[in-house]
Every structure is written in structure tokens, then in C-alpha cells.
Amino acid sequence: MLLATRQFADATVAAAAGRIDHLSAAAFEAALTPLLQQTGARQGALVLDFSGVDYISSVGLRVLMIAAKQMREAQATLALAALQDVVGEIIKISRFDRVLAVSPTVDDALGRCSAAAQASYQSRRPGP
């Protein structure tokens, strides 16, 4: 699984797509690990854009739990954004919304992490 990344000031947005289950969780973790290390080293923010993720299993949740622990230890921020309904329900039922910051949009997540990152993101979006 590839994570498409974009940098906005001191925050990185990484977009995942597809299913995060027993077949893809290892690839998701492998793609996520260098982003966690980079973000943790600079004590920045990493926003996972899950708008393209249509399912996450317990194995995928385990990857998120480990990532959240690593980011807390590095005094960095990890947030989830733009969850599809099914993924949102899984996150809520498993109470991961108490472990991770969950926002309805990437814009909102960036606003919770960094005003500079949110301003950078908003300046790069196409107008109405």
C-alpha cells in the first residue's frame, strides 16, 4: 500500500486508499513507519486522510495503535481525517476515537494540529 503524502508547513498529510486488513496491514505499516519517524523527529503532525479507506480490520487498528504510541512518545501529533461511514463506525465501536484525534475533514484535522499547516492547506486548495 502506498501513502500519497503532501506537506503543509509543519504537518504531513498521508492519504491511504482501499482496505486495511490482514492482506494489506503489513504494507500499510511499512509505508507508515518512515512517516512516523520523520514526523516524530521534528515533533510535527501527521494527518492520515482516510477518505479513500473503505474498511479497516483489527490488524489495521493494531497498526494505528502502535503508531499512536510512537507519536505520543515522540511528542508529535497523529490524527485521522475524513473517515468513510463504515470506517468511522469501526473506529467508534473500538473506541479508537478516544486514542486518536478524529476530524471530519483534513482541513479540520490540520486546524487542530497547526494553524500554519491549515493556512498552507487552504491556500493550495482550488477556490469555489
Image: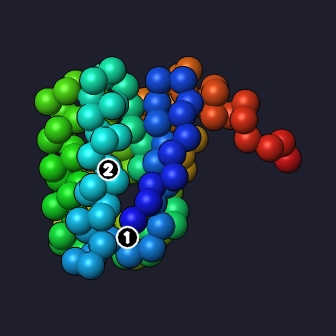
Q: Which residue is mark 2?
A: 32
How far across and how far down the image is residue 7, in percent? 54, 34
Asked which secondary structure carries label 1, the reply is helix
Residue 37, quarter of the rendered image: top left
Count all numbered tags in the image, as a single digit: 2
Residue 113, quarter of the rendered image: top left
Circle 1: residue type: Val
Residue drawn at the location 37% of the way across and 25% of the way down: 44
Residue drawn at the location 22% of the way across and 46% of the way down: 67
Which mark, residue 120?
A: none
Q: Compared with residue 80, is residue 25 higher up or lower down, i.e. above or below?
A: below
How far across and how far down the image is residue 6, in percent? 55, 40
How far across and how far down the image is residue 8, in percent? 56, 30
Residue drawn at the location 18% of the way across and 33% of the way down: 72
Q: CA distance from mark 2 to mark 1?
A: 18 Å
Q: Tell which of 76 and 96 is nearer to you.
A: 76
Asked which secondary structure carries label 2, the reply is helix
| Among the two numbered marks 2 and 1 on one chain, the one whose residue lies closer to the N terminus | 2
Quadrant of the image for the N terminus?
Answer: bottom left
Residue 55, quarter of the rendered image: bottom left
Q: Which residue is mark 1?
A: 87
Circle 2: residue type: Leu
